[in-house]
Amino acid sequence: MNIFDTHAHFTEDREKTSATLERAAAAGVSRLMAVGGSPELNRAALLAADTAQAAANTGHLPAVFVALGLDRDQAAPQGTACPRYDFSAAIDSRSRISAIGEIGLDFHYAPESARAQCDLFAAQLELARELGLPVVIHTRDADDATLGVLDENDFHNGIIHCFTGSVPFERKLLDRGFMISISGIVTFRAAENVREAARYAPDDRLLVETDSPFLAPVPKRGSENEPAFIVHTVEFLAHERKTTPDALAALTTANAERILSC
């Protein structure tokens, strides 16, 4: 298979990152996006891209694209300035940045920071607009607020990562032009809502991801997730959508290439 994992997080351990990428390549992952969301995760994403680039002549690692951003847990305390991340070094090599992310809203664990999260989310959308890039959005227990910030900023270009919402919410996101990315949660026994959303997504709006190191799919559940495990999600999702794993991998890879302009 030729799989594009559109959402993977890394650490700043170069040796571990290299080994993870080697296993991904062996499993059929030809491309992946290393995703930031904090200064530490942003550095790790750039390190993953550097690691893959260093091995480019050998051709044995996946191509690594990068998303950089500030996620909801980076929101400033109420009454303080909205944080900014210095993208200047990465922007000097513009081709390395494929998206702004991970960004978004999560009111499940920190509803008290909702206003600050919305302010940061809006600021990241403005940065994406300035750079002409799509965004990678996290949204949990914040459906109305997510739609509200997107509409207030008239933003329609990006990926809703690790989608776990309802089909009505999915429909509203699709109407606004967003891609729907499905993670290993789709394989979990209790995740019928995710399976329903995965079946509903149009062919040209569907993506797959690991969200590693989180959310390892069945039969790897309980392990630290990694891009190599995405094959299990692809096989499961292909069955749900009544197609073959190779066809689903090709479809989602083409969609990722289109949204990320790569």
Image (cartoon, rainbow, N blue to C red):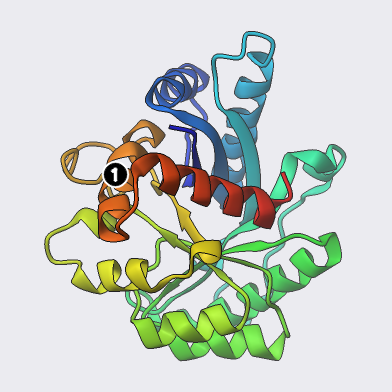
Please give the count of numbered marks on the rendered protein: 1
Above/below status of 253 relative to 166: above
Q: Residues within 10 Å of mark 1 (few under 14, many from 20)?
A: some
User: Residue, x 40% and y 35% (percent of image)?
Assistant: 227
Q: Residue furthest top?
A: 58
User: Residue, x 36% and y 35% (percent of image)?
Assistant: 226
Return the residue nearer the eye: 167 or 14: 167
Q: Position of residue 175 (x, y in %)?
A: 57, 84
Q: Is residue 42 left or right of residue 123?
A: left
User: Residue, x 47% and y 62% (percent of image)?
Assistant: 161
Above/below status of 135 relative to 234: below
* Residue 115 seen by the camera: no
Q: Is residue 206 left or right of residue 48?
A: left
Q: Hey, what amino acid is under mark 1?
A: Glu
Q: Position of residue 201 (x, y in %)?
A: 43, 70
Q: Image quarter for residue 142?
A: bottom left
* Residue 135 seen by the camera: yes
Return the residue nearer the eye: 214 or 160: 160
Above/below status of 76 relative to 175: above
Q: Position of residue 215 (x, y in %)?
A: 28, 50
Above/below status of 16 relative to 137: above
Per the image, label 1 sits on a secondary structure element best described as helix
User: Residue, x 65% and y 43% (percent of image)?
Assistant: 66
Q: Is residue 98 left or right of residue 52?
A: right
Q: Could you tell me which quadrant the N terminus lies in?
A: top left
Q: Position of residue 245 (x, y in %)?
A: 35, 42
Location of mark 1 (residue): 235
Q: Could you tell me which quadrant the C terminus lies in?
A: top right
